[in-house]
Amino acid sequence: MKKLLTIAATLGLVYITPVTVQAGPQEDLKEFRAYFAERFPDVPFQEYVNGVYAIDEASREQWESIEEFPPYELNIDKGKELFNTPFKNGKTHASCFRNGGIGIKQDYPYFDPDSGAVVTLEGDINACRQENNEEALGWSKGAIADVSAYMAYTSRGNKIDVKTPAGKGAMAAYDRGKFHFYSKRGQLNLSCADCHQHNAGNRIRADLLSPALGQVSHFPVYRSKWGGLGTLHRRYGGCNKQVRATPFPSQSDEYRDLEYFHTYMSNGLLLNGPGARK
């Protein structure tokens, strides 16, 4: 613990981050992009979908060689098979989604005024299954990550386009997600922004901290550390654990709101999931 605290202090991670929720989404997005454009002036906007490999030439070549024979190919195949396997009533997952579920990941997450909550792709996958009297899938890995990976694969090249419709509900969810992103937590007293905005590109131990811009574009992700595929909420939980905070459950209100803000900040970038990371 003492070593981790020393690392955080050395990087300048332990300091007070102003939390401002008054600005609107469009202003936030403009400022967010401008921050990274100034921090990494040589990185083209669309390159941020490649995460840390957009700013780390030393490891990019190795990553590109991995992507030539991606470790998540079998997951895409499994997800496609499960997506198209008929339920007991004869329907499939495709019956629940716009355009048969093909090429729609850019629509997620969205705010649903009827439920008053943010809805994620994984949330709609399980809602589809339950509406058809099928068992819900686990949230963080396994079959749900496979189905999500297949749907993400069919959406590659589509532009992230999260909406924040007028109304108190959507803005409240957006502001909660924004507050979560900038709020410190855990024994290391760090926020998402401390690592992935203010210190993006800095080194913590042997790893570079990736920019928050574009992080959502390549999920679900196959991580070497996991030895398998995982959802964005699985990664959120891992980040919480790394700062010595108790993680929220996957698909909790907290993580869905965070995903809403986090994804909105990448509007305009092209989807390239699933991806492979360390």
Image (tube, rainbow, N blue to C red):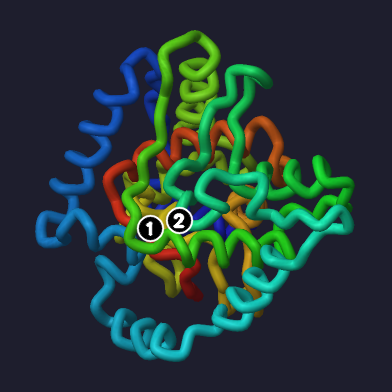
Where residue 15 appears, x then y in whole percent?
Answer: 41, 36
Q: Is residue 224 above or below residue 260?
A: below
In the depicted structure, whether residue 100 falls above or below residue 58: above
Quarter location, residue 218: bottom left
**Distance from the alpha carbon under mark 1 to that under mark 2:** 10 Å
Query: Which residue appears at 68% of the width and 76% of the height?
Result: 78
Front position in the image: 72 or 89: 89
Residue 153 to residue 88: above or below: below
Give the image location of residue 101, x and y in percent.
56, 53
Q: Position of residue 166 (x, y in %)?
A: 41, 13
Side of 201 where 276 appears, left or right: right
Q: Nearer the viewer, residue 11 or 139?
A: 139
Question: Split into 4 quadrants, where in the image is the N terminus?
Answer: bottom right
Q: Which residue is mark 1?
A: 271
Does 203 sit left or right of 123 as displayed?
left
- Residue bearing the label numbered 2: 103
Question: Which class describes the residues within 10 Å of circle 1: few (<14), some (14-19), or many (20+)?
Answer: many
Q: Secondary structure at mark 2?
A: loop
Quarter of the image for residue 137 reads bottom right
Nearest to N terminus: mark 1 or mark 2? 2
Res 246 seen here: no
